[in-house]
Amino acid sequence: MRNFIIASSMLLALPATAATPINEVRPFDADGQIEIENLKGRIQVRGWDREEVKITGSLGSGVERLVIEGDRQNLEVRVKYPNNSGWGGNKSEPTDLQLMVPLRADLEIDSVSAGVDVSGVAAGDVSIDSVSGDIVVVGAPREIDVDSVSGGIRLTVNSSDVSAESVSGEVLLRGRMNGEISADSVSGGIEVVVNGEQIRVLKANTVSGNVSIDTALAPNGEIQLESISGRLALTVPANISTQARAESMSGTLVAPNVTVQKPRYGSGSSYSTRYGSGAGEINMQTLSGDAQLKFK
């Protein structure tokens, strides 16, 4: 009798359902679009040279099912949670999604608290939205658009156009980028390092986070940096050709070979200068943070 009670207690301590293994393969065109949704857990995507999508991993306990719908051009992979559990709540465990996809397939990824890890893709378009999960991308998509609320964003990409936005998470962008870069954060820091390319347009905005940019500027290119209380730091080649302007209400302005202008009465400082032939444009504006322009 005593052994029966112990055995019964052990059974009651086990979860009602265990994690369910995933092993699915679908034929898919090399230039199709894949939509992936997993609210919590992990989303891992890797590119390969096959015209098929392989889905592995495991469904968390309490998850209703994995939905796979579509055809060779458009495929949806979605983790479905019970209707009465909101976006998963406490009634379901995290799900681990791992996908192998054609390296040129477009990606649209949505999550709430699932971490997103994408590598080895060269899609035309990659779009990722998350609330609290971190986002990491390594690849060469032509265009990439990433949004997060509190999760960090780390992109190492060779891309033409890049857009990254976070509220409190850090935004780190590195790689060969030569088109338009847009980076926004409220309290998280922003760091952009462009390797071996001249950027055409770069815009970075933050409220209290610091901004650090290291890039060359294309002929007639434009850089705009704005902050409320965060520090702005821009590093460019010494042979740059640009008009450079900066303004601050109470912060310190520093730039090579400039005389910072201050009003006789009141607060504020500014400068306007030309480097080289002045083909490009640099504008830095901050309320109380410092702004520094330096050569490398």
Image (cartoon, rainbow, N blue to C red):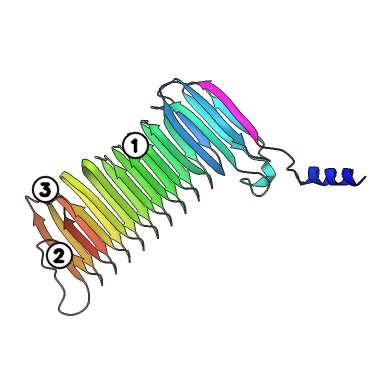
Name the residue that disc number 3 marks.
Answer: 279
**Residue bounds of the magenta highlight:** 18-27
Q: Is residue 168 magenta?
A: no
Q: Quadrant of residue 178?
A: top left
Nearest to the observer: residue 261 or residue 90: 90
* Callouts 2 and 3 close, C-beta under 8 Å: no
User: How would you rate the neighbour count of disc 3 (Cα within 10 Å): few for under 14, some for 14-19, many for 20 or more?
Assistant: some
Type of the residue with mark 1: Glu
Q: Quadrant of residue 128?
A: top left
Q: x, y (%) of residue 255?
A: 15, 62
Residue 265's label in the rendered image is none
Q: x, y (%) of residue 116?
A: 47, 41
Name the residue that disc number 2 marks.
Answer: 271
Q: Residue at x 27, y 48 (%)?
A: 193
Name the residue that disc number 1 marks.
Answer: 143
User: How would you rate the neighbour count of disc 1 (Cα within 10 Å): few for under 14, some for 14-19, many for 20 or more?
Assistant: many
- Whichever of callouts 2 and 3 sits on the residue coming sooner in the sequence is 2
Left or right, residue 95 beside residue 53:
right
Q: Residue at x 67, y 42 (%)?
A: 83
- Whichever of callouts 1 and 3 sits on the residue coming sooner in the sequence is 1
Q: Residue at x 80, y 42 (%)?
A: 11
Q: Secondary structure at mark 1?
A: strand
Q: Residue at x 29, y 63 (%)?
A: 231
Left or right, residue 189 beside residue 24:
left
Q: Main secondary structure of the magenta part?
A: strand
- Whichever of callouts 1 and 2 sits on the residue coming sooner in the sequence is 1
Type of the residue with mark 3: Ala
Q: Secondary structure at mark 3?
A: loop
| Distance CA(mark 1)–CA(mark 3) | 26 Å
Vertical placement of residue 37 versus 230, above or below: above
* Callouts 1 and 3 close, C-beta under 8 Å: no
| Distance CA(mark 2)–CA(mark 3) | 18 Å
